[in-house]
Image (cartoon, rainbow, N blue to C red):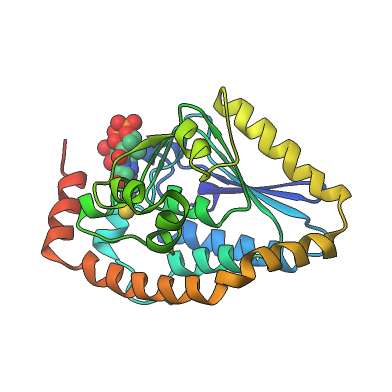
Amino acid sequence: MTDAIQLERERGLLTVRFNRPDKKNALTRAMCSRLAEALKQADSDPQINAVLITGSSECFTAGNDIADFLQQPPSSLDSPVFHFMLNLLDCRKPVIAAVAGAAVGIGTTLLLHCDLVYVSRDARLRMPFVNLGLCPEFGSSLILPRLLGQAKAAELLLLGEGFTGEQAAAWGIATEALGSGEAALAKAREMALKFESLPPEAVRISKQLMKAPDRELIRRVIEEEGALFIQRLRSPEAMAALSGFINRH
Ligand code: COA
């Protein structure tokens, strides 16, 4: 299971790779714990300048593992998925994402907390929380309406409409859309390695300043969304939708 999250060091860059291809890189509790730990370590290791999060050239991640959600749903903010996302939120080093293929649920939400996001033009992003009887998570109900306006954000969060990497870049969710997954990863890596030649203290302070104005508000919204998400997971609507996905064949 540890292999489902691969960690690679290349000079000052830590690459964190989702590697569970048979399940479209869906994130289990164990994977979230590993991600939380990797981000915490990167944050405190003075040799690491930046973190790159990626999947494969076919799939970023299908989001939280739905079977896990049914068997062992998170019951409080002290759960692996919250540890992972809160460590992402608190990471003082730049976090860069390279996205190709499907980025569903938390696979899209986590991008809202990365500093630089490179996507393939044909990447398929989607936050089908309502469709699954759930609700938005990790600040997306605040960040997306601010970024896209209420009307566009409603298409993504109330209807659960999917969108492409090209749209993500046009709307400011991604930094740039590139011609292929390989190109997105190459560009993400190239930009991530640039942090090696920049003064780390200046980078850290600048990131902190960019995040500071909304920091407390985002954290409060995450707690509100999290409490409702945990309730929704146990609702008949969500149980039916999640079981429907697992038993669809
Ligand atoms: N949790 C658990 N298993 C998942 C999963 C998830 N989030 N997403 C995909 N899988 C599994 C499928 O059950 C399937 O397993 P099986 O081969 O044992 O039946 C395998 O991964 C391949 O998925 P499949 O749907 O057949 O691949 P696809 O290429 O047709 O579609 C996706 C890929 C990502 C578009 C599709 O799997 C999907 O929409 N997944 C659900 C994503 C979701 O709703 N996430 C939000 C969770 S809150």
* Residue 59 pos. (x, y %): 46, 35
Is the residue 236 above or below the residue 132 in the image?
A: below
In-image side of 15 versus 153 (left or right): right
Nearest to the observer: residue 244 or residue 89: 89
Which quadrant is the C terminus positioned in?
Answer: top left
Figure quadrant, ligand 1? top left
Residue at 25% x, 60% y is: 134
As drawn, is 238 to the left or to the right of 83? left
In this view, 19 is above or below 68: above
Could you say where residue 148 lies in the image, as x and y percent from the top left? 43, 49
Image quadrant in which you'd find residue 102 = top left
Residue 231: give x, y in percent of width and height.
Answer: 24, 72
Figure check: 228 above or below 200: below
- Is residue 207 depicted above or below 13 in this figure? below
At a point 55% along the width and 70% down the height, the residue shown is: 214
Count of number-bearing discs: 0
Q: Is residue 123 visible?
A: yes
The foreground one among 244 and 112 is 112
